[in-house]
Amino acid sequence: MKLKDKLYDYIVRKNANIRYEYERYVQEHIPEHYTHRSRHWKILGKLIWHYRVAKKTQPMMYWEKNGSSAHETEQAIPDQTHNIKKPDPKKTIEAANSATPVKGPYLRGAESTFFHRVAPYHFGKGLLQYEVISFDIFDTLLFRPFEHPADIFLLVGKRLAYPAIFTSYKKSRMEAEKEARSQLQTQYGTREVNIYEIYEQLERKSGIPAETGVQTEIQTEKDYLFANPYMQIVYNILRAHKKSIVLTSDMYLPGHIMAELVEKCGYHGYEKIYVSCDYRCNKGSGELYRRIIDDYPGKKIVHIGDNYAADIQGAQKAGFETRYYKNVNDVGRQFRAEWMSDLTGSAYKGLINAYLHNGMNQLPFFYEYGFVYGGIYILGFCQWIEEKAKREGIDKIIFLSREGDIYQKIYRKLYGDIESECIFWSQFASLKYMAEMQQEAFIDCVVRQKASGALNVKLSSILDSFSIQLSEDELKKYGLCHSSIVSGYNLEAIKKCIGSNWESICKGYRMERGCVIRKVQTLIGDAKRIAVVDVGWTGSGPLGFKAFVEKYVAKDCNIVCWMAGGAGSYGTAEYALPYYQDGTLDAYLFSPLHDRRNEQIHVTENAAVTNNAVFELFTQAQYPAFCGVGECGNYVFDIPEAENYEIISQIQKGILDFCMLYRETFSKDAYLCNISGHDAYRPFSVLAFHKHYFETHFQDIIYGYAFSGDREHQHIESIGERVKNYYLHIGGQK
């Protein structure tokens, strides 16, 4: 790590309050950060004095709408020897909607490298000195794919068709367990109930037959429990060395049921299971461990588990040696997005935490970026497309490439009931082949966006990008030449020059357009109701394709346009608003009509040069952007972003693996794949508030912001270059 990063970690990130206020202030004053950085240093100095020297707890700058601070208390960056601080359960929905998230991504690399566990082979060999090895079961040998284990009761209630009119099945199930424990305590002096006693209580209150409830819950556990791959290796090493293995659990499931669960997950050859409900005593008191001692007198015993109080302190009371396997959700919780819906959030977070932090996987950064932040969005979007297409009677889905490439791959792999095609299209194509209808937009996009860049692009490069043939003599009339550098100084002259040659420019596009019409006709076929799918953001891509088809290809086609994210509020892309209102245009993650909070997060000044670029890495393909059709009918492409191709490959492998893992994990309750756009965007929203994350990992990523780059030198700006120069440009204008 660089020295400046170490200093930043020590000064800012080790105090959650300083981190929250300073990084929020920077995010809200990006141009100032580049043009008057000393102001930010002064703010940071005041925050250090406020929180570290004066030891104040109230916020210095940011107070939430509910009148309380959303800050966490001071906490050092944790390592493997510290418990990770749990989120404040008292945060309200109001705070969630009004406050910037405090949680953030792991900034030093791939999150899977954050918490170091020794290799399972070393862990296993370290246990060979013991004669008897005791394993905790849940969260040690076995995982549930939920952040909170009790959330599995929500699925049980759904399977039982529990009439959740005034209360949820989860709450009723937990109340029944609480009452059963209290009753057992009164009668027999123990609280260690079994599942049958719990459902006897529940039957009296809900009418659900106890046996039906028991069998449904057990089957749900069987459907979702899976082996911890780390502990499976440790377990098999010990079996190979003929060690005595016992399983020990504080649980309401009796030993014969626990045996079914562990053996279903591949654990065989253990000698005995000790369960609290069978022995009517628990691990925390040390009493359950003493039963093991009674069965193995004089043996050297070690216990492994994830609950520090029950598995470590309780076992030590009985004289056991111990090994602590930190709970994967306790490790990963600080990095997970807040304010997701309860069930989807628990399923997503539980699966991510189990995969990243079990001790087996130290993943490449960009693979993990796709797996953690892109997978849930792509999976949810494809499910949304499938359901919406069926509901609206769509004949064919057309994915606009290149962003549509990954959408179609996942869609066809997981769904694909409706015929789909991927077609080359882009803003280039919309501008060129609809030029006669949008002269002002064409000239603005062709010239103005390049003038705001920092590539020092020659006019000849821009003209070549759009296949515009203008002679040197024609350019001289406006004080220009092919080697002129496009800038704010000659912007108006270039616009006038293109405007005066407008008819000849449009004429040059008509032959190309004929080739495109024939290719689009072939792809559309006989379809009459078509959904056009694109990533976003203003709707110009799909709306441009719709207009092209309806004007030149098939006037009787009914075309709707769907995007991942739609931005039309806050003064951007106002032209799209009527299309949202009449249903022609819709978006999954957010739009001007829904989830405006996420739209606001994405559409900030920073979004113009960072959020979109980093988000679109999820959907970039390993080929250049489409520019049009050549004289021979061949496809013409933009400058290849070859520097990104290996990164894109890793990202999309991570996305695919997440989609397959999530779909397979929850296949028995397929409704869990109905992921709302709000939930799908929340993981990425965590990144949007941490500019340092982008600066650290994405500065060198190539991204063509303003219709390509410098064609003459085959160079496109990096994200880092664009961010710096864009805000310097804005600062100069102010």
Image: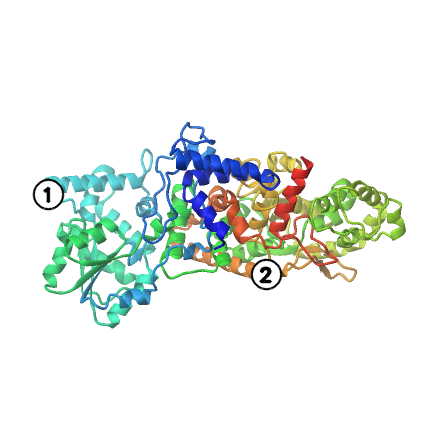
Depth check, front residue: 137 or 409: 137
Q: Residues within 10 Å of mark 2 (few under 14, many from 20)?
A: some
Q: Is residue 386 visible?
A: no
Provide the secondary structure element on which disc 1 rests.
Answer: loop
Q: Position of residue 691 (x, y in %)?
A: 53, 45
Which residue is label 1 attached to? Answer: 189
Q: Is residue 661 visible?
A: yes
The C terminus: image quadrant: top right
Q: Position of residue 125 (x, y in %)?
A: 27, 68
Residue sticking out furthest to the bottom: 241
Which residue is label 2 attached to? Answer: 645
What amino acid does circle 1 point to?
Gly
Task: Report the number of numbered marks.
Answer: 2
Residue 679, compared with residue 233, is above or below; it is: above
Q: How is the image coloured?
A: rainbow
Q: State left or right for residue 550 relative to residue 379.
A: right
Provide the secondary structure element on which disc 2 rests.
Answer: helix
Q: State left or right for residue 281 relative to residue 40.
A: left
What amino acid does circle 2 point to?
Tyr
Q: Which label lies toward us, 1 or 2?
A: 2
Q: Quadrant of residue 166?
A: top left
